[in-house]
Amino acid sequence: MKRQAGQKLHSLPSFKPVPSASQRMDTNANPPPPTSQPGGGPSYFHLLWDTELDELHPVLVSIQKHRDRVLEHWYQLYVLHFADNRALGKVEFIELFGSET
């Protein structure tokens, strides 16, 4: 198949430029518009806006519903990454990360 001059083989997605280290360190580089978030900064641990929590709600409900499986998977990842250097046994891990408080 011969292509015409100037014809693209395929289109590539456009990417945003990677911010510089100083831009990544500046937490106020792209603050949300003040009108969209009344009351100042994020309310949940000063990290998440209420709208973000609303968007995460279905995911959090699913995690809660499958909590035992999630904790088991996290423990398996913990064992995989830390092997013999891990500090917690399975019971301790589940008690610590599965705690309600």
Image: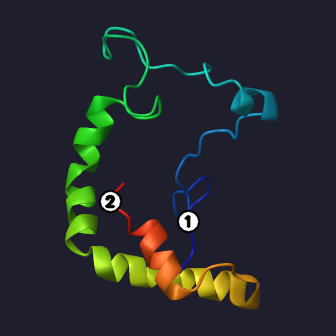
Relative to 73, say whether 28 is above or below. Answer: above
Q: What element carries label 1?
A: loop
Look at 69% across and 24% down and name the residue there: 26
Question: Where does residue 54 sit, x and y in percent of width and height?
Answer: 22, 40
Locate residue 95 relative to residue 59 in the image: left or right: right
Name the residue rendered at 68%, 78% in the picture. Answer: 87
Q: Which image quarter: residue 18?
A: top right
Q: Where is residue 88 in the image (x, y as percent from the top left)?
A: 61, 80
Left or right: where does residue 53 sit relative to residue 6? left
Type of amino acid under label 2:
Glu
Q: What residue type is labelled 1?
A: Leu
Quadrant holding the C terminus = bottom left
Say which element carries label 2. loop
Report the disc number at residue 9. Answer: 1
Dot label at residue 100: 2
Q: Are marks 2 and 1 in contact (CB under 8 Å)?
A: no
- Please tell me the numbered disc located at residue 69: none
- Quarter occupied by residue 28: top right
Q: Label 2 vs label 1: CA separation?
A: 55 Å
Q: Where is residue 25 in the image (x, y as percent from the top left)?
A: 73, 30
Vertical placement of residue 24 versus 77, above or below: above
